[in-house]
Amino acid sequence: MMFQESMIIPSLYTEDDQQVIERWIKHSEMGTEDNDLNDANRVAEIALCSVQGRLPQGIAIREDGSPVICRKTWHCQVPMRNDLLFPTHLLDINWDDSQPGFSWPESYYATVFPGYNVYAVTISQGSGDSHGYYDLAIGCFMADEPGEITAKASLVIQAWWESCHQTVKKFAWKELLKSGQIDAVTALRLRDEVWNKVVNH
């Protein structure tokens, strides 16, 4: 048995984590539309545990008028994951401004799962209103070279945007809030490619 199979996976992931990750990877690779959002959320939380402080935070107003941060946080069941999983920031977008001062940010990361050698692409929002969860894993890919990560992650993101348009008729996102591994020029090109395609079909 290979070292990664016999040592890395059991040391980084609980048995329940392994079942969820493996089921999610299988569904993602098959491109099934009924991929369990609960699994997608669990995978995202495994991937993003070490960067929770960087994720979008929604704000709600209490009855007394005071603001409260809405973002859900979670505890990492395997603390050593925080030292071994390194989410790569791809980009942050704003879908739209619902009213002055209130935007709909969405952050994108790619995280490799040691032992599985698969990158999970995740989205994070400041509210669970849109999908029922703050964080979701939206697709996966394998990359042999670091230079492949951006291109392969971009394809997953474009598929997500296209799905958002098809399911809820989402318009093109309004602005790039922050570039990461995907720079501003590339982000705008990816957006235009998707919405030019969906508008013309």
Image (cartoon, grey):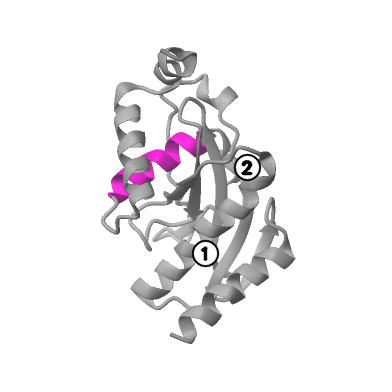
Q: How far apart in space, not on screen, are marks 2 and 1 (Cα)?
A: 17 Å
Q: Callout 2: few (<14), some (14-19), or many (20+) C-alpha neighbours within 10 Å?
A: some
Quarter of the picture containing the C terminus is: bottom left
Q: Earlier in the sequence, mark 2 or mark 1?
A: 2
Look at the picture and state if 190 lies above or below 66. below
Look at the picture and state if 125 lies above or below 119. below
Residue drawn where x is 43% and y is 44% of the image: 72
x then y, percent, for residue 104: 52, 66
Q: Nearer the viewer, residue 46 or 96?
A: 46
Residue receiving disc 2 = 88
Whether residue 173 is visible, yes or no, is no
x then y, percent, for residue 154: 58, 57
- Residue 40 located within the stretch drawn in magenta: yes
State which quadrant residue 82 falls in: top right
- Residue 65 located within the stretch drawn in magenta: no
x then y, percent, for residue 94: 58, 67
Q: Is residue 161 left or right of residue 63?
A: right
Q: Amino acid at mark 1?
A: Gln
Residue drawn where x is 57% and y is 47% of the image: 109
Look at the picture and state if 186 lies above or below 70. below
- Determine the secondary structure under disc 2: strand
Query: Magenta segment range?
Result: 36-49
Q: Amino acid at mark 2?
A: Thr
Residue drawn where x is 49% and y is 56% of the image: 126
Closer to viewer: mark 2 or mark 1: 1
Mark number for residue 158? Answer: 1
Whether residue 183 is visible, yes or no, is yes
- Determine the secondary structure under disc 1: helix
